[in-house]
Image (cartoon, helix red, strand yellow):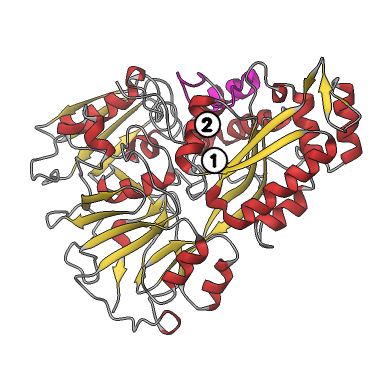
Amino acid sequence: MRSRTPLIALLGAAALALTSCAAGAPPSGGDGADGVLADGKTFTSVISTDPGSLDPFVTVMSVARSIDRFLYARLVEVLEDGSIASGLADSWEADTTTATFTLRDGITCEDGTPLTATDVAANITHIGDPANGSPLVGLQVQPGTSAVGDDATGTVTVTSGRPDSFLIENIGSISIVCGSVIDDPDALAKGAGATGMFTMTEVVPNSQYTLTRRDDFTWGPDDWDPKQKGLPDAVVFRVVPNETTATNLLLPGEVNAALVIGPDNQRLKDAGLFHTEIPTPAGQFIFNQAEGRPTADQAVREALIEALDLDQMRQVLGSGAGTVPTGLVTVSPNPCRADVLTGFMPEFDAKAAAAALDSAGWKAGSDGVRTKDGETLTLRMIYSSQLGDAGNASAELAQAAWKDLGVDITVAAVDSPTLSETLFSTGDWDISAAPLTVSLPSMLVPFYSGPTPPNGTNFASIDNPEYTDAVTAASAKAGSEGCDDWGAAEQALYATTSVVPYANINRSTFATKSTFTEGDGIDPTSIRMYE
């Protein structure tokens, strides 16, 4: 049985986004490339933190999943417009409780052995069994989901453990591993059992991960041509925590791709580099409602938000380009796309915030720090170090406002593994400013309801009957038919100040001598290398 300490999908992250589109054109001029496709190249992509475990059954940390994208194939590919393209499967059908996928012919594992329908079914059943501790339960695979494979016909029949509005998108997008490693978490942690375009050839933690393209990989989306020019022979993921360093490596072409969301973003745009544009949440507060935490009190949560000038924080975090969110789902296919947030954001009013804490029993002492029943209002906020200098500046604004309110507040920027450990294991936090990035409303459910760590992924210990009721209603309706209920579910979270999204940004991954499309990481089949 695997550890029940999951890794959360966070900015940089981000996400469990299924797809997105690329902006820009084939390299020319500004990035020093001549636009001629080239074979035999190595594509080097910067990642800002070590991914930790690569086990696709365990991790939902975006940096790890972005590497898994290269190693493990999926049954289908969900495109930016919500349409579905072939992956391992060339046909499929589903309602909200059952799905059938028919596999392509000739699919193999990294060792050349066939990937069978039975193997694929075993992947799905493994994840769906709560005893195996996968955080994908409730996120992409409903609890109790099982599957059966028919090797003679190449079909995989899935029975969902409970209704799922987006059954094809969710089941179809999980990473499929070879049957030989399904029960070997140590092997999967190192990226073994590849069914995708690349295999792992070298792992140097906190330094780089080297992958090699498989000559026998032919099952790219739809009519993808494995013999087309410009496909890379190898891929290197290089750990570079500092965005300015990454920018300085990218401009002369020492690396091919880097996610840059801070001030260096404009420098790269001014240089004319190819880049993708993906709208993602950057500013988001989630409050720990575990018993005994001051933030378990809604009055405290509301006061903390009232004390913040979220407009100012949005501008700082987004380097002047942050936008106002309309909901928690930002990334394609995002089937609902409605404004469900307007009217639920508290107004900035420091005096009202102070009065609210007074009413809640938190009185300011002679030193200005608030206490209640002899207990000091001491809080700890954590946020992702991947947010860079802009994230630091935004956190400092919040810290200053809360200190003025009388809160004994500490803030800490942490890397992705530490963030995961804090949220899902130690529980030593009160406010998380690390946003979740998802592409379907159903993906939020296990994070905002249900079992808490170590038995689940409801890391903020939220118990909101209105949210649960709306989710139940939405899940019984296929696709966008449930959008009104999904919207009501989000609003139940806003109404209780359980989560407060205040800033979105366009996340840009820049490239030299290469182009690609990007969603939950770069799509390996889309990479084209240039001289």
Quarter of the image holding residue 221? bottom left
In this rendering, the answer to whether 475 lies above or below 416 is: above
Please tell me whether residue 399 belongs to the stretch shown in magenta: no
Q: Is residue 451 visible?
A: yes
Where disc 1 sits, the SS reads loop
Q: Is residue 55 left or right of residue 184?
A: right
> Farthest residue in the front direction?
367
- Dot 2 or dot 1: first in sequence order is 2
Q: Position of residue 243 (x, y in %)?
A: 51, 61
Q: Position of residue 458 (x, y in %)?
A: 53, 25
Residues 292 and 499: in front is 292
Categorize mark 2 by other alpha carbons within 10 Å: few (<14), some (14-19), many (20+): some
Q: Is residue 134 left or right of residue 122?
A: right
Q: Is residue 221 visible?
A: no
Residues 335 and 136: in front is 136
- Residue drawn at x 84%, y 43% as measured from the top left: 348
Q: Position of residue 501 (x, y in %)?
A: 66, 42
Quarter of the image holding residue 405? top right
Q: Position of residue 295 (x, y in %)?
A: 71, 25
In this rendering, the answer to whether 141 lies above or below 41 is: above
What residue is disc 1 on?
Answer: 436
In this rendering, the answer to whether 365 lies above or below 154 is: above
Front of the two marks 2 and 1 = 2
Q: Is residue 311 left or right of residue 442?
A: right
> In the rendered structure, which amino acid carries the disc numbered 2?
Thr
How far separated are the C-alphas under marks 2 and 1? 15 Å
- Please identify the quadrant where the C terminus is shown: bottom left
> In the rendered structure, which amino acid carries the disc numbered 1?
Leu
What residue is disc 2 on?
Answer: 422
- Please identify the quadrant where the N terminus is shown: top left
Magenta part of the chain: 451-474
